[in-house]
Amino acid sequence: MKAVHFLVASVFLALASSLASASDPSSLQDFCVAINDTKNGVFVNGKFCKDPKLATPNDFFFSGLNIPRNTENQVGSTVTTVNVAQIPGLNTLGISLARIDYAPGGQNPPNIHPRATGILVVQEGTLYVGFVTSNPENKLFTKVLNKGDVFVFPAGLIHFHFNIGKTKAVAITALSSQNPGTITIGNAVFGSNPAINPDVLSKAFQLDQNVVKSLQKKF
């Protein structure tokens, strides 16, 4: 009888395992519209693969992440991405990298990575960082980071970095996707193309329409 119970349990676990693994692969782009005529198909979920026999060391190489970037812009920061667009060998490997340079008082404004968790290490300076959990809690997790400190940003959550020091700051972020995507909240909401109807944003943010229109002009 025990053998029968063990066999039933084994079959159940095998079925559960097969069902659990029968999910769609994670998307590597914002969307991929199905098409029946493959002659007009121009995108895949990821990128086409080179014949492995033709791969070279340069397919797995990037140089220049040590070079400081210009941070003279509205937010006072510059992000240098190293993803599959820069290193073709990252295709299908599920990882990428970015260098972020911050001017004093500069920030990487609230944004999300829809396809990746990020882990950041501060190389220089002092950063105030944080992320906000999903509804309904919207709990804020923050930390002040100094050189050598590490912080994790869970996938899909709004997060930010702010240089609170009086000198420049530099950080490196590793991301769990070859194409993590970035949605900067202000740009997406107030700078969409075409613009979102001010009535929608006015009610959503409890703002006067003139304020909404002014914000839209800034983005």
Image (tube, rainbow, N blue to C red):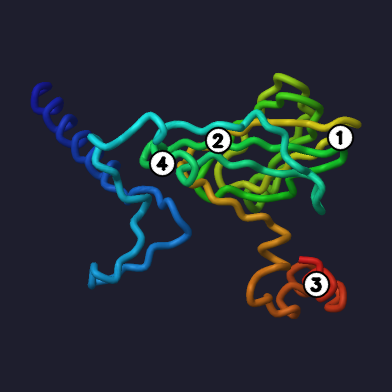
The amino acid beneath tag 3 is: Lys
The local crowd at label 3, few if under 14, some if 14 to 19, many if 20 or more residues have their Cα within 10 Å, is few
Q: Which residue is mark 1?
A: 164
Select label 1 or label 4 by which is in front.
4
Instruction: Give percent across and percent down for residue 31.
Output: 43, 62
**207 relative position to 10: left or right:** right
Examine the image and state in which quarter residue 216 appears.
bottom right
Under tag 2, what secondary structure? strand
Q: Which residue is mark 2?
A: 97
Q: Is residue 102 above or below residue 123?
A: below
Q: Which residue is mark 4?
A: 88
Examine the image and state in which quarter residue 39 appears.
bottom left
**146 relative position to 44: left or right:** right
The local crowd at label 1, few if under 14, some if 14 to 19, many if 20 or more residues have their Cα within 10 Å, is many
Question: Decide: marks 4, 2 in contact (CB < 8 A)?
Answer: no
Quarter of the image with the N terminus is top left
Q: Which mark is residue 210?
A: none
Q: Residue at x 36, y 50 (%)?
A: 47
Q: Residue at x 47, y 46 (%)?
A: 85
Q: Which residue is mark 3?
A: 217
